[in-house]
Image: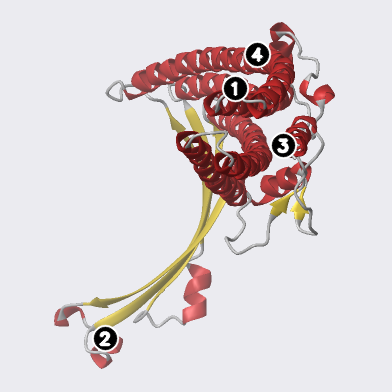
């Protein structure tokens, strides 16, 4: 009887060692790729960046339109009151009041402005391109966040299964302990230790359930799903081949990220934009030439001439060129040039800082991947040893050679080894996926 019971316990542990059961799937399960694609289109941060891009495009259109002539229509109507000595027959009839009406059509165009218009268009075009890169970078950042949340759910799901199996095992140990206590083979203290372990395992199950729900909620928030949305994720198979995927060298990863990562391209455009800002500021010191043209007419009451006759007789046309040469403006131009040069220097420093941050991030992620891989395979070996040790201690406990404390210690060592392997597994996969995404590789699982 005793041997049958412990054989059942051992088989339970073997099931844990071989694999954790996959959660039941349903029609609403999302794959990682589905989550990523949905978040790229619906996440609020992505939508906010899309509006920023639209604003930049509108500014570019405005900058281009500044090259073309302006055209404005104006009209006014007024009443004049005059002294009685200046009355004529019309005014006398209207109590000394006369009316006037005027119309005007004016146009203006900048011909030369020290290259400011041309450079402003170039600068705004660069800023629009940078906004496009920023949008794509935001989508990549969301991909990374979704991947982290997705893998966290998978980890918490397996961790919950492990906690439940540990609780089931300790419950069996309590049942067997009660039999041994009634037979006088163990003391009340030893039985209490078994029950205490079972209570602790039950608490771990509750904690694991809460962690799983929290992780699921975090992913739903990234996807901008309502709290009441029926949502679950699929559980792909993650075997040793996935965990042990080849890891590129830091130099290869860094060069690829520099060449393809949107935020690096945006940073480079920031330098070019700042350089154009210097040219625009210097252009303010150059003469500017503009052209204007207009046509106007008007009407005044009390003249004895009809309304439309006056509009025709008072028709006036004008055209002219304006030249403006800045001579002294309280150092405004010089100050603007200096500030633009400072902004250019800041853009260069920011680009250098971005490059260093990227290198630091890649180095950290790569180290995490290498370390997690080593820990995973080391934990796998440790797990095999812990499994064998628990089997032997279980047999010795049944024979009365080992006490309850030693049995619980071996059982906890086994669960700890399984937990360490589980942690290393998902840390390795996450680091590998992040490193690949920085190298412009799509995230697949």
Q: Which residue is mark 4?
A: 371
With respect to residue 373, does 280 lie above or below? below
Q: Which residue is mark 1?
A: 402
Question: Disc 1 versus disc 3: distance between alpha carbons?
Answer: 15 Å
Question: Disc 2 versus disc 1: distance between alpha carbons?
Answer: 126 Å
With respect to residue 257, does 185 lie above or below? below
> Pointers 1 and 3 in contact (CB under 8 A)?
no
Depth-wise, is mark 2 or mark 3 nearer the camera? 3
Q: Residue furthest right?
A: 241
Depth-wise, is mark 4 or mark 1 nearer the camera? 1
Q: Which residue is mark 3?
A: 2
Location of residue 23 in the rendering, given as x and y in whole percent from the top left corner: 75, 48
Label 1 Cα neighbours within 10 Å, binned few <14 / some 14-19 / many ≥20: some
| Residue at disc 2, secondary structure | helix
Whether residue 68 is visible: no
> Pointers 4 and 1 in contact (CB under 8 A)?
no
Label 3 Cα neighbours within 10 Å, binned few <14 / some 14-19 / many ≥20: few
Question: Disc 4 versus disc 1: distance between alpha carbons?
Answer: 36 Å
**Label ID, residue 91:** 2
């Amino acid at each position: 009887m005793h041997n049958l019971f412990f054989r059942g316990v051992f088989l339970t542990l073997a099931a844990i060692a071989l694999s954790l059961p996959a959660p039941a799937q349903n029609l609403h399960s999302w794959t990682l790729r589905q989550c990523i694609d949905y978040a790229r289109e619906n996440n609020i941060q992505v939508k906010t960046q899309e509006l920023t891009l639209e604003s930049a495009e509108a500014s570019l259109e405005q900058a281009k339109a500044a090259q073309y002539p302006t055209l404005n229509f104006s009209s006014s109507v007024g009443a004049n009151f005059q002294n009685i000595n200046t009355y004529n027959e019309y005014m006398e009839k209207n109590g000394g009041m006369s009316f006037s009406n005027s119309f005007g059509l004016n146009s203006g165009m900048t011909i030369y402005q020290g290259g400011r218009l041309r450079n402003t268009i170039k600068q705004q075009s660069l800023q629009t391109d940078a906004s496009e890169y920023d949008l794509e970078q935001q989508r990549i950042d969301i991909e990374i966040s979704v991947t982290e949340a997705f893998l966290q759910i998978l980890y918490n799901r397996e961790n919950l299964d492990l906690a439940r199996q540990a609780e089931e095992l300790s419950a069996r140990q309590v049942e067997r302990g009660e039999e041994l206590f009634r037979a006088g083979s163990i003391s009340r203290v030893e039985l209490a230790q078994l029950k205490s372990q079972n209570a602790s395992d039950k608490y771990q199950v509750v904690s694991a359930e809460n962690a799983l729900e929290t992780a699921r909620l975090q992913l739903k928030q990234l996807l901008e799903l309502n709290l009441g949305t029926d949502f679950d994720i699929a559980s792909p198979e993650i075997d040793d081949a996935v965990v042990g995927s080849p890891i590129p060298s830091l130099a290869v990863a860094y060069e690829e990220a520099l060449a393809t990562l949107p935020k690096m391209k945006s940073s480079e455009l920031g330098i070019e934009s700042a350089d154009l800002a210097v040219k625009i500021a210097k252009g303010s010191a150059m003469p500017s030439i503009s052209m204007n043209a207009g046509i106007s007419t008007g009407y005044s009451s009390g003249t004895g001439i009809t309304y439309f006759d006056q509009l025709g007789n008072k028709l006036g046309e004008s055209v002219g060129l304006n030249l403006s040469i800045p001579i002294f403006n309280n150092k405004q131009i010089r100050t603007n040039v200096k500030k633009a040069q400072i902004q250019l220097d800041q853009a260069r420093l920011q680009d250098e800082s971005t490059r260093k941050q990227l290198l630091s991030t890649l180095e950290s992620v790569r180290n995490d991947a290498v370390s997690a891989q080593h820990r995973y395979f080391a934990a796998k070996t440790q797990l095999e040893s812990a499994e064998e040790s628990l089997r032997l201690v279980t047999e010795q406990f049944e024979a009365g050679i080992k006490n309850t404390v030693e049995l619980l210690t071996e059982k906890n060592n086994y669960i700890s080894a399984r937990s360490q392997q589980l942690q290393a597994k998902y840390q390795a996969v996450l680091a590998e996926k992040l490193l690949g995404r920085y190298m412009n590789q799509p995230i697949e699982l």
